[in-house]
Image (cartoon, grey):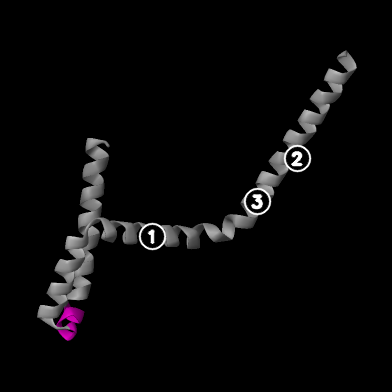
Amino acid sequence: MNAKLIELAKRRAALIAGAEAQRKELGEAFKAWIRPLAILERGAEAVRSLKSHPELVAGLAVFVALLRPWRLVRWLPPGWAIWRIARVVLGAKRFLTGP
């Protein structure tokens, strides 16, 4: 019985080492995909956010309809800057106050 336990322990160690090697290989293979997948995840997060706030989408549609598209182009750079600043401030506020 003792010899069987020793053999099982050796087999277990070999399987664990093989699994570790496979994990490392997979990690290397997916290294190139980390950034594109992160971008896709942020896009999916934006879609989920828009779905959870339909009033924001409706307000934006009304805003665009009233301003006309060519005027909206002038507002994009400052609007983007305001959006980024708001995200940083709100993120810092969440960080300071906790979840």
Tell me residue 39's x, y (percent): 43, 62
Q: Is residue 87 left or right of residue 68?
A: right
The disc label shown at residue 44, or none: 1
Q: Amino acid at mark 1?
A: Ala
Instruction: Give the CA distance from mark 1 to mark 2.
Output: 35 Å
Is residue 65 shown above or below 83?
below
Read off the residue under disc 2: 18
Which residue type does callout 3 highlight? Leu
The CA distance from mark 3 to mark 1 is 24 Å
- What label sits on residue 54 in the rendered view? none
Give the structural element (helix, strand or loop) at label 2: helix
Image check: 44 left or right of 14? left
Name the spot of residue 94 as percent of width and height, x first. Answer: 24, 42
Quadrant of the rendering where the N terminus is positioned: top right
Q: Is residue 73 above or below residue 35?
A: below
For marks 3 and 1, give the one nearer the viewer: 1
The span shown in magenta is: 69-74
Up-down relation of residue 16 to residue 28 (above or below): above
Point out the residue furthest to the top here. Answer: 2
- The residues bearing labels 2 and 3 have C-alpha atoms spaced at a distance of 12 Å
Assess whether mark 2 and mark 1 are in contact (beta carbons under 8 angstroms): no
Kind of element beneath mark 3: helix
* Residue at which label 3 appears: 26
Q: Earlier in the sequence, mark 3 or mark 1?
A: 3
Q: Residues within 10 Å of mark 1 (few under 14, many from 20)?
A: few
